[in-house]
Image (cartoon, grey):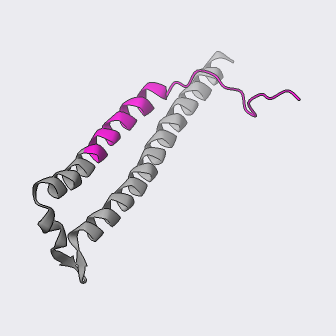
Amino acid sequence: MLHEPSTPAGKDPAGPYKIRLGIWMFIAYSLFYASFVAINLLNPLAMAAIVFAGLNLVTVYGFALIIVALIEALVYDWFCRRKEAFYLKAEESKEKGQD
């Protein structure tokens, strides 16, 4: 059986935009995570402080890390879809202009 991609793969004009956006979002999340690690290294007792609804800082921060990662994924997808739609519309208008 021949295994090929189900859709044709070509050059992605939005590729450089996606890479830049992904790198910036990775840096932002890494800084957020690094601050979590820094608090644990420099002042681990601070993580025991109750900060919200009877939950300590480590629990709230941990959930925040998960939620921020999910939000970043949705934001990344939204921005990439917008950029892909922009390039698709530009390509379609260019093709109509040639007809």
Taking the image as shown, residue 54 lies to the left or right of residue 90, namely left
Figure quadrant of residue 3: top right
Task: Name the residue located 71 percent from the left edge and 27 percent from the top edge.
Answer: 8
Going by the picture, which residue comes out furthest to the bottom?
54
Taking the image as shown, residue 79 lies to the left or right of residue 33, namely right
Measured as percent of width and height from the top left, residue 21 is found at 37, 36
Figure quadrant of residue 63: bottom left
Measured as percent of width and height from the top left, residue 94 is found at 58, 21
Quick check: is 76 in the magenta stretch?
no
Measured as percent of width and height from the top left, residue 12 is found at 55, 25
Taking the image as shown, residue 3 lies to the left or right of residue 40, namely right
Quadrant that contains the C terminus: top right
Measured as percent of width and height from the top left, residue 50 is found at 18, 78
* Magenta stretch, residue numbers: 1-30
Quick check: is 12 in the magenta stretch?
yes
The relative height of residue 93 versus residue 57 in the rendered view (above or below) is: above
Task: Name the residue located 18 percent from the left edge and 72 percent from the top edge.
Answer: 48
The relative height of residue 91 versus residue 43 in the rendered view (above or below) is: above
Front residue of 5/40: it is 40
Task: Name the residue located 13 percent from the left edge and 67 percent from the top edge.
Answer: 45
Quadrant that contains the N terminus: top right
Circle count: 0
Taking the image as shown, residue 88 lies to the left or right of residue 35, namely right
Going by the picture, which residue comes out furthest to the top?
98
Front residue of 31/77: it is 31
